[in-house]
Amino acid sequence: MTNTTGTITLSLSPAWTVACCTGHEAGSGVAPHPSMPWSTSEDTPRTITAGTVKVLRVGTMHTACPYFRKAQRHELGANMYRGGDGPLHVSRGKTNHPLHQAFLQAARQAGYPFTEDMNGFQQEGFGWMDMTVHQGKRWSTACAYLHPVLSRPNLRAEVQTLVSRVLFEGTRAVGVEYIKDGQRHKAYVSREVILSGGAINSPQLLMLSGVGNADDLRKLDIPVVCHLPGVGQNLQDHLEVYVQQACTQPITLHSAQKPLRKVCIGLEWLWSYTGDGATAHLETGGFIRSRPGVPHPDIQFHFLPSQVIDHGRKPTQQEAYQVHVGTMRATSVGWLKLRSANPRDHPVIHPNYLSTETDVEDFRQCVRLSREIFAQEALAPFRGKELQPGSHVQSDKEIDAFVRAKADSAYHPSCTCKMGRSSDPTAVVDAQTKVIGVENLRVVDASIMPSVVSGNLNAPTVMIAEKAADIIKGHPALEDKNVPVYKPQTLDTQR
Ligand SMILES: Cc1cc2nc3c(=O)[nH]c(=O)nc-3n(C[C@H](O)[C@H](O)[C@H](O)COP(=O)(O)OP(=O)(O)OC[C@H]3O[C@@H](n4cnc5c(N)ncnc54)[C@H](O)[C@@H]3O)c2cc1C
């Protein structure tokens, strides 16, 4: 947000900066993940077009691709699909780990193609993942976009700071109120307020500021600035389950999780940014179609040569490997609402996971197709017993029960301030990222996706922010003339 003296950037924590910003590319906040798999996902534009008819004008790959490229500095250099000189470093999985190699081979034996670049021409298939890792270190959007400009005189960054509401004069946003060290402060803008608090906080902040469903706001005694019922609705996410197999050889990351070994890994990383501390370990993965007739990959796999229990809170006790698998195009849609008018209270979040039969069936497919890959010859030298779901889980009913018990968020909440036409009663921002019904207020983050992308969310969020930056600065939109994308030879078969 700009104030009279320039631009200030507010954030909750120093490490994962940027909640609200302007003056440079917005949306630099990214989640605290050591080094996230980066997927641009060939159909990302679906997100932007669904129901909104080419809003943001990134309705096809040729309008999204230039912004993916603009953001990216890929270690393999530039081509039609990836950038070579952007601020965000991206590296390619390259481990020689035998389990990663065997997983890719097993996928091929199961009949899926190998794809050279799942973020390029061909998303469908299995291959090496891209990661936002640079010289062994996680390269966050804060590293890419914020840290290099921190010394600018027109930028002020505040950390350990909670934005509590947008300040309005009538329906015109004039600044924000924020809390720092227990004190409330106000920052006024000369131009616009831009919220980039993410898919949970941006709608929360709008509602705290009086922009949302008027009936709900009145119940909490929040003065209504604008009745915008779509705020907090349309919550979409990716769920995933882990299919886990014991490994008969002592080659997994099990030993790396022992205390002494962890110290050694940490020291090596601190010394040279190499070793097991220098990678996300999710170095292979893939995208496939769940069944015949589906035109585009709707299931994603990440392979890990280790077993994760309770998000890593419980250490694994054995040699094992797993895939994280989930559907990319869930039809279940949730919502979030304010719990109270206190900005420190977490909102009520109701994701409605697995509330449609389609999603339940798709997850059955996820489990069955994962098992099929794990059963291939290439993994025979390593294959122990199935740990999860376990061989006793076979029928539809048993698989459904397993999925309901074990499925977890892949941490991809999105779409809660969806972009759309002002005639769409559920739209929150317009094609220019401006909040509908008020002035001087934009949202730029994962919340403005109309529907969740078929891939990981970080790269599309950065792409949206790059595009929004051009819109905000009044620059002409970048467009490619022609960006070919892979189409399966036939949709009569699943692979
Ligand atoms: C644990 C985890 C792992 C993930 N792994 C991957 C992955 O491997 N690959 C991938 O592509 N995606 C991954 N994601 C998803 C990806 O990180 C998000 O989709 C992406 O960061 C969304 O960007 P955003 O700018 O919308 O929101 P965020 O990145 O959440 O940024 C919002 C920022 O606003 C700040 N903020 C929020 N509210 C306030 C407030 N009131 N006042 C001040 N500051 C505030 C937050 O601290 C944060 O810095 C992961 C997410 C999580 C949580």
Image (cartoon, helix red, strand yellow):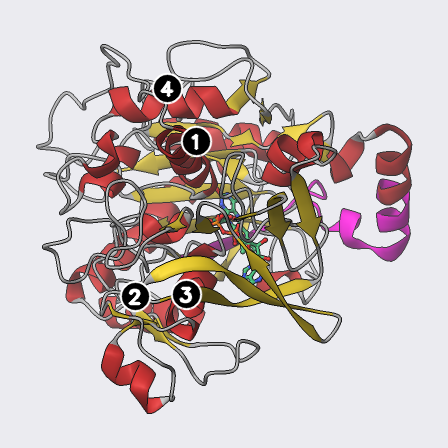
Q: Are marks 2 and 3 in contact (CB under 8 Å)?
A: no
Seen at 24% across and 84% down, the residue is 215
Drawn side of residue 12 relative to residue 378, left or right: right
Q: Please report the bounds of the magenta region as a residue range.
A: 240-265
Q: Is residue 327 visible?
A: no
Marks 1 and 2 sit apart, C-alpha to C-alpha, by: 23 Å
- Helix, strand or loop status at disc 2: loop
| Front in this rendered view, residue 355 or 176 | 176
Give SS at disc 1: helix
Which mark identifies residue 231? 2
Q: Which residue is mark 1?
A: 466
Question: Which mark is first along the chain, 2 or 1?
Answer: 2
Q: Can residue 201 be seen in this snapshot?
A: yes
Which residue shows up at 49% across the image and 44% down it? 27
Residue 436 sits in quarter: bottom left
**Helix, strand or loop for disc 3:** strand
Q: Residue 118 has which mark?
A: none
Q: Amino acid at mark 1?
A: Glu
Q: Position of residue 346 (x, y in %)?
A: 51, 77
> Which residue carries the number 3 mark?
168
Where residue 321 appears, x then y in whole percent?
57, 48
Tell me which amino acid carries mark 2: Val
Mark 4 or 3: the one toward you: 3
Callout 4 amino acid: Pro
Is residue 328 located in the magenta-colored stretch of the structure? Answer: no
Earlier residue among tags 4 and 3:
4
Q: Is label 4 or label 2 in front? A: 2
Between 132 and 99, the one lying in front of the other is 132
Q: Earlier in the sequence, mark 1 or mark 4?
A: 4
CA separation in Å, label 4 and label 3: 36 Å
Q: Which residue is mark 4?
A: 66
